Structures are given as C-alpha cells and as structure tokens.
Image: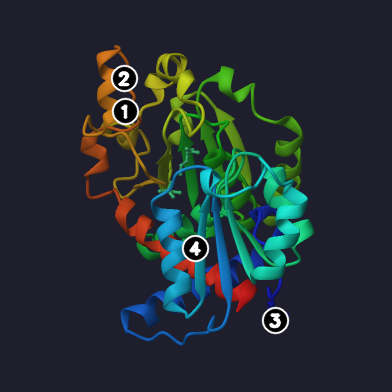
Amino acid sequence: MAVNLKGRSFLTLMDFTTEEIRYLLDLSRDLKAKKRAGIHNEVLKGKNVVLLFEKTSTRTRCSFELACLEEGAHVTFLDSKSSQMGKKESLEDTARVLGRFYDGIEYRGYDQKVVEDLAKYSGVPVWNGLTDVDHPTQILADMLTMEEHIAKPLNKCKVVFCGDIRNNMSYAWMYGCAKMGMDFVAYGPDVLAAEMDKETIAKVEKVAKETGATITVSSDVSAVKGADVIYTDVWASMGEEDQIPERVKLLTPFKVTKELMDSTGNPDCLFLHCLPSFHDFETDMAKQQKELGYDIREVTDEVFRSRNSKVFDEAENRMHTIKAVIVATMG
Ligand code: CP
Ligand code: NVA
C-alpha cells in the first residue's frame, strides 16, 4: 500500500509503521542526492513553519531552518525567553494560535505531553525535536548513516546503546529498533536499568515480537558481542547537569573505549553518537567538571576520531532526514 504521511505529526517512531519509516529513509536518501546535485524543487513554497526551542540546539535547529529554507518555506524561531508560551499563555491557547499562523510546528523541550498537546490543539503537523523521553528525528539520521556504511539490511543489524540507558536517546533507539526488526541492547548499570519505564518496555516488546526485533537490557559487557553499532550519548542530558557527580561514578565503567569496541569482535563496528559529545576537554563544561574532579567524557578521543566513527556523516544526515519528515508530512 502506498505510504501517505500528509498532515501527520512526528512525535515518536512508535506512531509509525515499519513501511512508513522505510519511506522516510528512502525519501531522505533521495533528498540528499538532490541537494548534492543542486536540485531544490521548492516543494514547501508558500508554507510557514515555527520552531519552538525550550532547550539549546545546534544540529536540530540548523536542520529544520535549512530544510525549510531550501524547499521554499518561511521559518520563525522562538525560544522560551522570547515567547509567551507557558508563562503568560497556556499551551492549548499557544497551539491554537500557532495553528492559525503556521503550517507546521517543531518543538524541543522537556515533557513529551507538550508535543502531544501541540499536535492535539494546533491542527497542523508537529515535529518532535527532542523531549526528555524521545528524539525520533535523530534515529532517522542514525539509520540512514547505518545504511550508508553497513552492507546489510537494518533488520540484520545489532545496535548497542551504552551509558545512560534511561535517557531520551536510549528510548528513541529502542523504539526505532523495535519498529525496524533490529537487535537492540541497552548496556548500562543495573541501577539505571531499574529506572527504565516497565510499561514502555512492555509496549516495545510487543512491537518487537511482530517485527522480529530483540530488546535486551544488560550490564554485562558480553552483551556488546556482535554489535554493528556502538552508540553513546552524554551522561547527563540537558536539564540534568546537577546529576553529573553520581553519573560519572555510575557510568565510567560504561565509557566507550577501544577495548569496548574490540569486545564487539567486529572490526567494522560503527561508532555513532547524536552529538554534542564530551570526548576531550575542549569544552567549558568538560573543563569545569575536570577541575571539580569529574571526567565526564563518555567516549575516548581515540574512538571518536577512529575510522569506525561516522559521527559527522550522522550529523549531516540530520538535515536530510528532517527535510524528509517535513516534506512528507507538510509538503
Ligand atoms: N543531536 C542533536 O539533537 O544535536 P543538537 O542538540 O545540537 O540539536
Ligand atoms: N540526551 C541528550 C541528547 C542531546 C541531543 C540530551 O537530551 O541532552
């Protein structure tokens, strides 16, 4: 059956079928090739998009802005300081107003319920640019990167997410793997495994049964064996910086090192990371934390810069995949 995503919101991959995700990946590849050939069909000409950011961003914001501009749409950017949202105007009223002005709304912030409510009340497609519990556009970029570098289909691949296994990226990967019939391992400390939402895992496992995916949570390093992708993320996500001391203590054994990459037994295992990453001390935060006695690097510089690392291809793919999501749902 032909896939038609017009008018749909993109809040979580759990809302999409395997075929719909396949369609978005194929469209991403197509739009990437077109951009490289200098072809922009301006399929979004006359459309208006608003980007709401309650958390900071480099890749996601630039991807949404460029995707819209390259396809002819107009963009407004609002951060939490420069809008009334939540402070002087309810979310429902904000959504109803923005729905009158705009053809599509991107939101990055805290609560997943905000993207859900924006979609419910605005009447236009809403795209999740990251919440505390999900980051679905990132997974499309990650999968596209895998397909560009791994010579086997996604449903034959194993992805191991290392570190803060209860964060938004870990859940987002769990959803993506379940939908695409992949093997997913959350490799991290038992105490964080205990914090994972049981109801969500049960839902994911139900999907996994249908697609042939497997979902494993483990603190045993043997779980990384046979991985096609070792993935990690910062140990304290945006808004959780006060938890750095305890996270460093908990997660240092799960740092991505050359030894961990070798433990996969796969010399071609990719290293992927959503970025931004602490892999050296060239950031203010890494330096400040080092002075306080905390090494917050979740991956060594050696792995980050190795031939297995495709993190900058992955970053570029944010732009192509986000463009695909906008074109498919609003175009
Ligand atoms: N990966 C990602 O979402 O990057 P930004 O925080 O820079 O948008
Ligand atoms: N887990 C990270 C992802 C950043 C793209 C955060 O939420 O800060």
Question: How far apart in space, not on screen, are marks 3 and 2 (Cα)?
Answer: 52 Å
Q: Nearer the viewer, mark 3 or mark 2?
A: 2
Question: How far apart in space, not on screen, are marks 4 and 3 (Cα)?
Answer: 21 Å
Question: How far apart in space, not on screen, are marks 2 and 1 (Cα)?
Answer: 6 Å
Does label 4 or label 2 sit earlier along the sequence? 4
Residue where numbered disc 2 is placed: 289
Question: How far apart in space, not on screen, are marks 1 and 3 (Cα)?
Answer: 48 Å
Res. 152 in view: no
Residue at the image position 35 percent from the left and 33 percent from the top: 263
Residue where numbered disc 4 is placed: 153
Residue where numbered disc 3 is placed: 2
Q: Is residue 247 left or right of residue 206?
A: left
Instruction: Please state, as top left, top right, bottom left or bottom right, where the C terminus lies in the image.
Output: bottom right
Is the residue under label 1 in contact with that under label 4 (CB below 8 Å)?
A: no
Does label 1 or label 3 sit earlier along the sequence? 3
Which residue type does callout 4 highlight? Pro
The residue lying toward the viewer, choosing from 171 and 83, is 83
Task: Determine whether the residue tagged by mark 4 lies in a helix, strand or loop.
Answer: loop
How far from the left and from the top, in percent, is residue 326? 56, 70
Residue at the image position 48 percent from the left and 45 percent from the top: 159
Does label 4 or label 1 sit earlier along the sequence? 4
Q: Nearer the viewer, mark 4 or mark 2?
A: 2
Residue where numbered disc 1 is placed: 285
Res. 28 in view: yes
Instruction: Please state, as top left, top right, bottom left or bottom right, where the N terminus lies in the image.
Output: bottom right
Picture layout, residue 246 above or below residue 3: above
